[in-house]
Amino acid sequence: MVNARTFIWLTPFACAIAGYQLCFLLFSTNHVTTPDIVGTTLHNAAVALAQRELNPRILRQVEDASLPEGTVLKQAPAAGETVRPHQPVFLVITTQPPPKRAPSTHGSTHDHIVARCREQHIRCRVHPVASNQPAGTCIAQSPAPDVALGKEPLLIYASAPQPEHVLLPDFVGKNLHEVIEFLEPYGIAVTIEGTMPAKHHLRIVTEQKPLAHSLINLAQAPSVHLRVQNR
């Protein structure tokens, strides 16, 4: 009988203690402030949030080639706000855009290529190359079409008109066959003096006129006189 009375007497106190504990769990005033993680990497943001028992949640990814992958752009709640532990903090972070690929420029004009590259935010560099194609026409490119572009610019090789004046190289000691191949695209005639074996590649240039580094006018049908000897 005494035990039953004791139990009945302690019941209100036990209920009160249990209710207090329940209210403490449900309505606890334990709060933390959100850290400022904008501008940090996702890894550093996750560490800072974990130290305050907060959970990172990626809300959105935004392409931005100028920032490292995973840079935090926005956070919600904002820095300094009071929140409960284990509350999620939503993040907007950066991601790298897919690599640009080289467009096909062969046969296009210089102005069209430059405008197209500017529109696609592609850096390009145009190098003039002597060619019989119309001036400013792309005759080659690097890298090839549809190849991923790195940090280097797209190289365009565009045709340029033949120069009116050129400096004559030094051909002495060179193979006659190679010299003739070099002069042919410029329309420079060649006269040869010396021993005449059947094959040009067996002859070496020993003397030339005009001399090396002479300025010649391509518009006046120039010619070069070469003295050769057997190899």
Image (tube, rainbow, N blue to C red):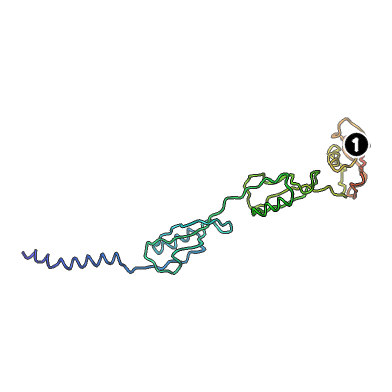
Say above or below: 56 vs 162: below
For the point 43% across and 66% down, the residue is 34
Binning the other alpha carbons within 10 Å of mark 1 as few (below 14), some (14 to 19) or many (20 upward) gives some
- Image-quadrant location for residue 5: bottom left
Q: Quadrant of residue 208?
A: top right
Tell me the quadrant of the picture where the N terminus can be found. bottom left
Q: Which quadrant of the figure has residue 13?
A: bottom left
Q: Nearer the viewer, residue 127 or 115?
A: 115
Total count of labels = 1
Q: Nearer the viewer, residue 88 or 212?
A: 88
| Residue corresponding to mark 1 | 229
> 42 above or below 158?
below
- Residue that lies at the very extreme toward the top in this rendered image: 198
Query: Does residue 30 appear left or right of residue 197 in this picture?
Result: left
Q: Position of residue 168 (x, y in %)?
A: 88, 47
Specify the amino acid type for callout 1: Gln
